[in-house]
Amino acid sequence: MNPLLTVLVLVLAAVGLLTGPVGLSDLGWDGVLALRGWRVLAAALAGACLAVGGCLVQALFRNPLAEPGLIGVGAGANLGGMAALALSAALPWLPAEALIPVLAVTGGLGALLVLAAVARRVVDGATVLLAGIVLSLLLSSIATLLTSLVMDDWGLARAMLAFGLGGVDGAGMIHLAIAAPLAAAGLWGAWRARTACDLLLSGDEEAATLGLDVAARRRWLLTWTALLVAAAAAVGGAVAFVGLIVPHLLRRRLGPGHGRLIPAVALGGAACVLACDALVRALPTNGALPLGVVTGLVGAPLFAAILLRRPS
């Protein structure tokens, strides 16, 4: 466990509790914990899940620039959340607060089942990756279609757009209660798979020679990643670049060994989303700036810098 990252997460969590348009003197500690405590927990959980999911995907495809969105699970979770908003608008007796995390998780795991069916039929990891990209594009297109169908309802269309951009401002106890078991299972699975991730970096043939069942391990890594991404989507929607930038930068500093990398990536992802969420609330804007926009504005230049610094 990296002590510097642990301290950073704790400091940023404290900053998150104290940052907002209403001061501590007006809210009191009970109000701060009630209004901002769940948001801070959701930001830390979403960041840790996305970053560890990115770490697993990069090991699975032996590509340091891979990220969880490539396997379609994030798009499935996003579609599930949008469907929950539409269903709640059509059936007002179904509360959106409870329906969003349930259908987001269902959508993410449904995408996993489709990708797992592909993974059983093919051996090549590149084919699985391409199938994930196609699945992600398909599900994103369906989500766009769903949004276009409800444009007459301005409030619903705005809510669906906001969910697609990502944010933890609406996260509460129900969201965390649904997401926490998935996150715990995904993080536990990722830690158990640390040795397999190290072996996969050497290539499928060499990993198989060393006794690793590559096809089975690939399916399990996809499962753990899906659980992590679904958990993050249940509390934060689509938050861009966290699963790409954080594991990539920490791998360059700590090395490829996943025994050190996975805990550090979890802390780094939590710190990243906590910092961006605090920035969202500190910026002097008239309305709430979506968290996914901020992570994209921060992550895109970093990604461009990484690409420019890579040897040709």
Image (tube, rainbow, N blue to C red):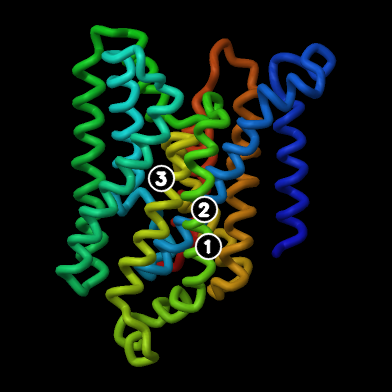
**Amino acid type shown at disc 1:** Trp
What residue lies at 35% left-to-right and 88% top-to-bottom?
206
Relative to 286, is 224 above or below? Answer: below
Quadrant showing the N terminus: bottom right
Q: Which mark is residue 188?
A: 1
Q: Mark 2 or mark 1, which is nearer the start of the sequence?
A: 2
Q: Is residue 276 visible?
A: yes
**Neighbour tally class for label 2: few under 14, some 14-19, many 20 plus, Cα within 10 Å:** many
Q: Could you give the CA–CA distance between mark 3 and mark 1, rounded to whole angstroms?
A: 15 Å
Residue receiving disc 3? 230
Query: Quadrant of the rendered structure where residue 103 is?
Result: top left
Q: Secondary structure at mark 1?
A: helix
Residue 276 horizontal/vertical position (percent): 60, 36
As drawn, the residue found furthest toward the right would be 25
Residue receiving disc 2? 51
Query: Depth-wise, is mark 1 or mark 2 nearer the camera?
Result: 1
Q: Secondary structure at mark 2?
A: helix
Q: Mark 2 or mark 3, which is nearer the start of the sequence?
A: 2
